[in-house]
Amino acid sequence: MDLQDNPLIVVSAGIAIVALIFWYVATEIDRRKRNVGTIAIGIVVALCLVAVLPVKEKLKGGIDLVGGSSFIVEIQPGKDEEGNSLPVNEGAIEQAKATLSKRLSNSGLSDNLMQPLGENRLIIEMPGVGPERRDEIRETIEKTARLLLKKVHPNSNQIIAQIEAGTKTLEPGYQVFPIRRTDPETGKVIGMDKILLSRRTIVGGDKVDLARPGDGLGVINVLLSKEGGRRLTNATKTMTIGSDRMAVVLDDEVLIAPTVNATLGRNFIVEGLDGREEVRTVSNALNNPLKYPLNILSERNVTARYGEEVVRQGVTAAIAGLALTLLFVLIYYRFAGFVALIGLTVNMLILFGAMAMFGATFTLPGIAGIILTIGVAVDANVLIYERLREEIAGGKSLINAIRAAYEKAFSAIFDANITTLLTAIILLWRASDQMKGFAITLTIGILSSMFAALLVTRVFFFWGSDTEALKKLSFMNLIPAKTIKFMEMRKPAFMLSSVLLIGSLVVMGTKRESSLGIDFLGGSIVNIQLKEGQELSEATVKKAISDLTLEKNPTIQLEQPVGAEGDLISIKCASNDLEKIESKLRSDIGILGEINTEKNYDIAFDNETISPSLGGEFLKNSFYALGLGLLAVLFYISLRFEFSFAVGAFAALFHDILICIGVVIMFGTELSLIHVGAFLTIAGYSINDTIVVFDRMRESLRSKRGDVAQVMNLAINATLSRTILTSVTTFVAVLVLWIFGGSALKDFSFAIMIGVVVGTYSSIFIAAPVVYIWSKKGSKLRQELIDASLDMPNDLAEPVPGK
């Protein structure tokens, strides 16, 4: 069953799940919680299994992982409302990119990659698109949707007849347009006539606020902007009601020309379209109109951007890393680790099921989102189990210890996930297509992690306790409980961080463009067109140029142009590397050499300039999204904690990202799209880690008496075991990816490993001291501590066990 074709089932199941979760949260009876939670888990698991099976058919990979289709389109000069020509410039290219991105996303084609090619062309790469959708995509791309409302000449039919008879010439200020002739019964187009319209446009398509399918066959309801509505009202006021006519022109073809029977406002309807499919296509196009017509020059099937071998190695390494992490959790937490494994399995099932349900694609940035999701999920379980260890050590019965552990860990899990979720949602709203894969995966992953950690695992513990199958829990303990005076180390830590930050800024300043890859700078593209029967693999080309000293790392893809006899090898490289690469290929690969010309091998080297895929628009959208995300996180932390905590979180995040970028560049790595996903993962990890430490600090400040620095030391020490366990497991999982993954995944995993180390360090030595320093300047933190300590015993001398 395909749930995308049965939205009623998804909606009904969703309503039932939400209702059950509210019931689960509201009830205080453990047995009822257990039963309601079990039903909710059953519905979720069943729904996701239906959505995701069979896996190969339901889960779609992105262009970077599995390949897809590629279109090269030419941007042609446009026209304004009066018909004057608009030249193609940089603004025209950006407008075409933005409009096509929205159109294709609305048609269910997300995670598209667009790159300007030459002066007036675009490369559009779409993941997992086969031949069966090419006609639909071609129409979506080429539909200009230039909507115009024009007044009809009162004697249109008579004058056109005279013009065709040669007895009259065309009047100044008017133009002849084709008009559809439709069957009054079926609404189908049966022919074309001619109509005479004013050259002056009443309202253009740029004034359309919303277009959606209307009631009846071939009908669209259109809502104009306030300016468009004002212009239409003023125009129809001057017309003779009941006799004057107004034409609706779409892409220089008149759909209808009805009589004006009233003064019109912002709303009107467009009739005369040829069936539901055209209504859908035109509605989508009207909502995202193109100012410049597009002409498709070529269509191609393309292989995975990072190569099949890299993808295969990456999947194997990721599974191995995950298995290693789960094995450690099982050994360290024993039966509780087994419950965590069940929760993580449900978590991944929800993630993949939701992706399949909504037709989302898995890209490399999306995999970054999965890695962060797994890290967050493991961290949530470690938080709960370290609390559980503490409650059992305090002498509570098993069921009471479980209840207390989940209640006390809830605030840390909730706050850490909500702050990451806010950033993910804003990225989904504002970021470019390349980052939406990360945002979608992370958004679903965070929600599934909270469901699995707080509901699924707790229900399993309820069943174990109620059936008396679980009578006691035991854990390993590799991290002894002791108090380390972290706050007294803040000055050396600040000095170290200052050196690292200055070093990072110096490296970024000196390397500049040399640290950026083709994704950011653009370059040249070499297309090698083979004849039928000739074979040349990506691996062969990569091996041939591997010993060259190149300015930038090239990207090699195998393509199959539609209608061509042979394959095409596409190499994106730095412009200065062009001659080196071509010369090397001709000398090392037999069929590309000059000696083979007599054998009639028609090898064509086609070289063109290519613009950055992560250009100015991408960077602008990314900065806007990240800026809004940070503001949302700061506001939330201020609301849930206090402003000093928000300052500490911002300082730690700023610290982590800058140092990670500096270290990655210092090791000679070129920054590319793959690093953008890595740095977003690091940002999410940093925020999550910091919030967990902050939660324990908040709890300690409310319940303990004494100096703020001492209380903060206790809080940091209380979370130390959780911090070390989470960091080590995440680091080891990514280390496996770095050791066994391909070259692209090595860059990705290396950046995340640096991020894990720096993020762990900053949550202890940067975030907490910044909160302390800020609080000393008169924030309400100290007064809150004083109020809480008035009737609390002094227990600062006692060591606090791991959280």
Image: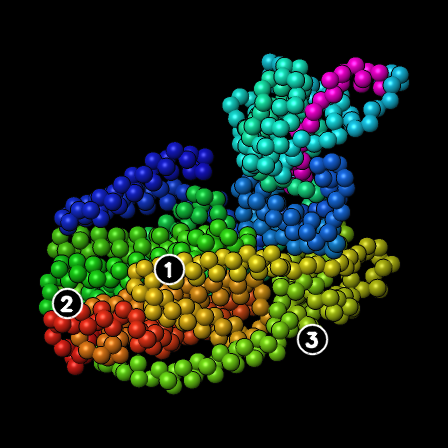
The front one of 766 and 464 is 766
Cα separation, mark 3 vs mark 1, equals: 49 Å
**Range of the magenta residues?**
139-163
Of badges 1 and 2, nearer the viewer stands: 1
Which residue is found at the position 15% from the left and 67% from the top? 392
Identity, as a three-letter code, of the amino acid under mark 1: Phe
Q: Mark 2 points at which residue?
A: 392
In the rendered image, the quadrant that contains the N terminus is top left
Q: Name the residue under label 1.
A: 635
- Vertically, is 39 above or below 613? above
* Residue hosting label 3: 549
Foreground residue, 629 or 182? 629
The local secondary structure at tag 1 comes to helix
Q: In this view, does 694 lie to the left or right of 272?
A: left
First-in-chain label (2 vs 3): 2
Where does residue 181 sit, x and y in percent of width and height?
Answer: 69, 18
The spot of residue 712 in percent (x, y) is 26, 75
Q: How is the image coloured?
A: rainbow
Counting from the top left corner in percent of width and height, residue 240 is at 66, 17
Q: Is residue 155 magenta?
A: yes
Secondary structure found at label 3: loop
Residue 491 in which image quadrant: bottom left
Mark 1 vs mark 2: which is more N-terminal? 2
Is residue 348 found left or right of 702 in the rendered image? right
Which residue occupies the foreground of this view, 665 or 537? 665
